[in-house]
Image (cartoon, rainbow, N blue to C red):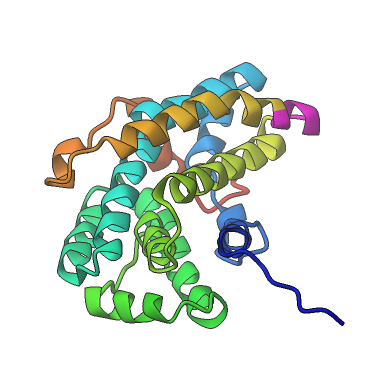
Amino acid sequence: MGTVTTPMADAELFDLLSWMSPAWPIGAFAHSGGLEWAVEAGHVTDRESTCEWICALIEHGAIRNDIVLFTHAWRAAKAGDARRLEEIAELALASQAGHERRLESTAQGAAFIRIARSASGVAGFGRMIEASGQSEPAYPVVAATLFACRDIDFTRALTAWLHGAVSNLVSAAQRLVPLGQTDGQLVLRDCRPVVLCAVEDARALPSGDPFEALGGCTLVADLGCMAHETQYTRLFRT
């Protein structure tokens, strides 16, 4: 039998797809990012409003801030700068607007670390996490750390991570709105230009203090995450 060789780029792509797969057990299916409240309140009612809600989060809301944190975390991990990574991780926790946003990020972050230590095969990841002292790990920070330690290109890494974030919201919308399978895929398709534009913008972020790039103007979405805590009936943790 002949020897089968796998180009490195293909191996990196395989790993990236594995880590962003729904089969990667971080519990993303249990979170809706406040979308459950948005549906109950009547802000999200169909395919169009679902797409608008998700795109607003990418361009102006919580996901945009996650993009900033992911970008700076990837750069710090790539440079092997554990102290810088620790500062970004602390900022990620401090920037969460409410208990459920923090819960969503840290629950997935902690699960990501557990499975990555066991199944990623990237030895440097565990060392970088320990050196940066992340006791309450934020999901975008730890994901960026793994991708950087695996030497995955930034554009590819952030695109995959955003695809995963959007896909999870689409999956939640299919259960909550509800949306059919075709409408769900159309929402994902319609989010593509916004995602790709966000990745390009992230590439151009200055390398200074990430705090200066954080912000947002999706007040209803942030308040919705807080309101979800006392919602009478809930399918999702957030």
Query: Residue at the top extreme?
Result: 48
Please provide the residue range marked out in magenta.
179-185
Q: Position of residue 227 (x, y in %)?
A: 41, 38
Image x and y of residue 169, in percent = 57, 40
> Residue 236 or 133: which is nearer the viewer?
133
Nearer the observer, 1 or 220:
1
Q: Is residue 23 left or right of residue 131?
A: right
Q: Is residue 182 part of the magenta span, yes or no?
A: yes
Q: Is residue 16 at all visible to an observer of this figure? A: yes
Name the spot of residue 176 as percent of width and height, x first: 66, 36
**Percent of width and height locating residue 141:** 34, 58
Vertical position of residue 190 compared to residue 36: above or below: above
Which residue is outermost to the front? 2
Q: Please count the marks in the image.
A: 0
The residue at the point 67 percent across, 63 percent down is: 23
Q: Tell me which residue sits at (60%, 67%) in the image.
A: 25
- At a point 38% along the width and 62% down the height, the residue shown is 148
Q: Determine whether, in the image, residue 190 is placed left or right of residue 56.
A: right
Residue at x-position 63% and y-position 31%: 188
**The image quarter in which residue 28 lies:** bottom right
Is 145 left or right of 160, judged from the image as shown? Answer: left
Name the dominant secondary structure of the magenta segment.
helix
Instruction: Tell me if I can see residue 223 in this picture.
Output: no
> Is residue 93 rendered magenta in the image?
no
- Left or right, 18 with respect to 161, comes to right
Q: Quadrant of the N terminus?
A: bottom right
Q: Is residue 180 above or below residue 238?
A: above
